Amino acid sequence: MAETEVFRITPVVNRCYEHAEYTRKEGRYPNERYFTNIPPRYVGEYIRSEQGGFGDGGWKTDYFRDLDGTMTGIDYSYEGRTSFREVPCRVHPPLPLEAIQNKTHVPSLKSLAFYQLPTQTVSELRENNILGGKFKKYNKKSNRKTNKKRKYKKSRKSRKNK
């Protein structure tokens, strides 16, 4: 089986990774290279990490979110063999506009799938008011505050003149 090079890196937020435990290393520090004969597994976008303990009782877990929205926790190994490879984020195939118009499988605004839709589909959703939200007439600023300020200034001027 072919070996794959992996890296002992710290994942960064908003990037996607594959995970594998390295099985062989070559070279001397600081020029070490790590390889695995087990195919790396796609774990998704890095979200956060948790760490605790100290010394031999220390632990660390990195959490990743897959395209389906499932959270995967990767525990770092005691031996320090936990490795990652940065890869392009996988994208679901775009939903047809008809399915979205019928409100079936509409991704929420906070989901990863929504932000991976093509820009054209998102703009069509906004134009057809499928995403919901208020219209422009609700977002108008009222002149109430400015009117109050004007009245207050006028009353102060009239007091000074007396």
Image (tube, helix red, strand yellow):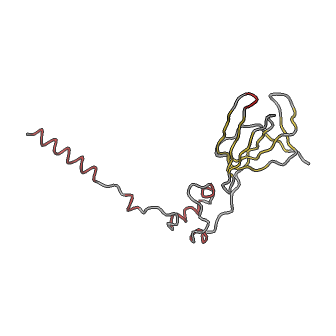
Based on the displayed image, in which of its 4 quarters is residue 116 positioned? bottom right
* Residue 119: image location, x then y, percent: 59, 59
Depicted 64 relative to depicted 50: above or below: below
Snapshot quadrant of residue 112: bottom right
Q: Is residue 117 above or below residue 89?
A: below
Q: Relative to 2, is 115 on the left or the right? A: left
Instruction: Identify the image quadrant of the C terminus.
Output: top left
Q: Residue furthest right?
A: 1
Left-right relation of 49 to 153: right
Q: How many marks?
A: 0
Q: Residue 43: give x, y in percent of width and height.
A: 73, 49
Q: Residue at x 66, y 38 (%)?
A: 50
The one of 104 and 140 positioned closer to us in this rendering: 104
Q: Image height check: is 142 above or below 128?
A: above
Left/right placement of residue 80 relative to residue 112 reads right
Query: Residue furthest toward the left?
Result: 162
Q: Nearer the viewer, residue 78 or 47?
A: 78
* Residue at image location 27% in from the left, 53% down from the top: 144
Position of residue 38 measured from the top left corner of the image (x, y, whole percent)? 86, 47
Quarter of the image for residue 134 reads: bottom left
Residue 103 position within the rendered picture, expressed as x and y whole percent measured from the top left: 57, 69
Q: Name the foreground residue: 67 vs 33.
A: 67
